[in-house]
Image: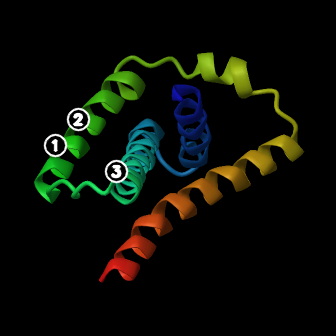
Amino acid sequence: MMIIFDYIFYRWYFFYKKKDVDPDIYASKIVSAYQLLTIINIVLLTTVVLGVSRPSVKYLIGVIVILFILNYLRYERGFDITKLEDRWGNESIEVKRLKAIIIIAYLVITFCIPWVYGFVTN
């Protein structure tokens, strides 16, 4: 699963590298948002499938802080981007476009599922 988030970090890193001096900060926070939305979707899925009650929002704040800290330690503190460049730097334009579409679709879907769930249940 971390390979997916590494790739998301890699692509957002190079997106922000053109616009800012510290692209790792932005890319790391975006990865945290992806991870948070994924966790929320897993919680909603277990709520619907198993019929358990949703956890309180105060636990979500703890999860957010933990994700930010873990991603800071992984991606910002002495992280060598060349490892990811070696892995994905030679992708063709078609593959990059396809993966960019998948990354955006993943974001849209993980964002819309909690919204639809809230709309349906209220």
Q: Is residue 37 visible?
A: no
**Which is nearer the N-term, disc 2 or disc 3?**
3
Residue assigned mark 2: 66
Give the residue drawn at x 31%, y 57%. Answer: 51
User: Is 40 situated left or right of 86 in this image?
Assistant: left
How far apart marks 2 and 3 lie (CA) works out to 17 Å
At x 16%, y 43%, the residue is: 62
Indicate left or right for 72 with 35 as reference: left
Residue placed under numbered mark 3 in the picture: 43
Marks 1/3 in contact by CB < 8 Å: the verdict is no
Q: In the rendered image, is residue 30 in sight? A: yes
Q: Residues within 10 Å of mark 1 (few under 14, many from 20)?
A: few
Looking at the image, which residue sits at the far front?
A: 50
Which one is in front, 74 or 38? 38
Spot occupied by residue 34 in the image (x, y as percentages of width and height): 45, 48
Viewer-side residue, 49 vs 103: 49
Is label 2 in a helix, a strand or a loop?
helix
Contact, CB < 8 Å: mark 1 with mark 2?
A: yes
Marks 1/3: CA–CA distance: 15 Å
What label sits on residue 62 in the rendered view? 1
Amino acid, disc 2: Ile
Circle 1: element type: helix
